[in-house]
Amino acid sequence: MYCSAMNGLLRPGWRTGRDAALQIAQSRIALPCARYSSFTIETLQKKFRDPSSPYHIAPGTQGPDSPDPPVEEPLSPEEEGRTKLAELGYDPESFWEQKVVWGDHDAFQHVNNVRYLRFLESGRIHWMHALGHELGGPAKAEQMTRGQGVSLILKSISIDYKVPVTFPDTLLVAHKPHPGPAAQNREPKTPARPAKTHFFMAGAIWSYAQRRIVTESDSVLVWYDYDRLTKCDPGEEVKAAIQRRMNLRSGEGTH
């Protein structure tokens, strides 16, 4: 099987015994017979042409760069968090990164419960700013976050603390509007419509360190006329924008 390599090693003048055996073993590693190589190439070529073979390559196409399946790069904590929350219907325009600092801890050696209210507030204002941009550009976005004209005011909020968070960590805060608990009794084919003067907002906080949701919240936001100091109906255009964000999980929303 090893052809000229073997013949060359045994030609007159070469040493015999242990030295010759060592030379033969080394040559067997790197010098296969030409007949064996030809057989292997022909066999592979036949497999490439055989439509029933897993190695088949259709005419006019090109095979993979490597016989091994492509290796999928693992998602980073940030990518995983954004992907998971988007799959759950949270508005990508609401995503807000919040670094945990050592001062967020309390005597129980985890992030104090009150801090989550601030984290959710920062994410909610970020979402309001994005909504204002859609409704009227930078000027409207500034008005909504400064309490000018028609904007939003928080009526109530509840928080479900799932897992303690500790320093160091970075949190991804996300929000999504929803029609509220009354919609659970609605007929499946009946579209959910936000109320005239308020809507519900679900929130979630994802931990990059723990790679999971660590806190959830639900709140009620009221449309409020800050010039007249009273709740109001913001109009059909505004309610349609909220409706689109309610439909993100179903793929109907645009942003």
Image: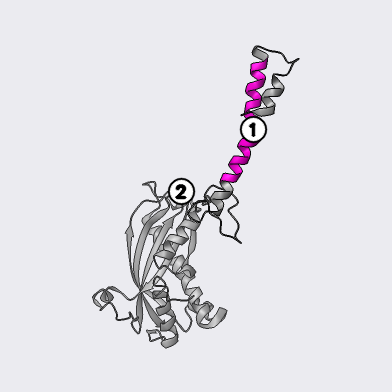
Depth check, front residue: 85 or 44:
44
Q: Amino acid at mark 1?
A: Cys
Which residue is at 39% across, 62% downward? 204
Question: Per the image, is 25 magenta?
Answer: yes
Residue 85 picture location, percent across and down: 42, 62
Secondary structure, magenta segment, majority class = helix
The CA distance from mark 2 to mark 1 is 64 Å
Dot placed on the residue nearer the N-terminal end, 2 or 1: 1
- Tell me, for residue 33, which label it has, or none: 1
Answer with left or right where residue 46 lies relative to residue 250: right
Q: Amino acid at mark 2?
A: Phe
Q: Which quadrant of the view contains residue 188? A: bottom left
Give the farthest residue toward the right. 13
Q: What range of the chain is rendered magenta?
A: 20-43
Q: Is residue 10 visible?
A: yes
Structure colour scheme: one colour
- Tell me, for residue 7, which label it has, or none: none
Q: Which quadrant of the view contains residue 184? A: bottom left
In the rendered view, would you say 179 is above or below 167? below
Q: Quick one: SS at disc 1?
A: loop
Residue 62 picture location, percent across and down: 60, 57
Q: Which residue is mark 2?
A: 167
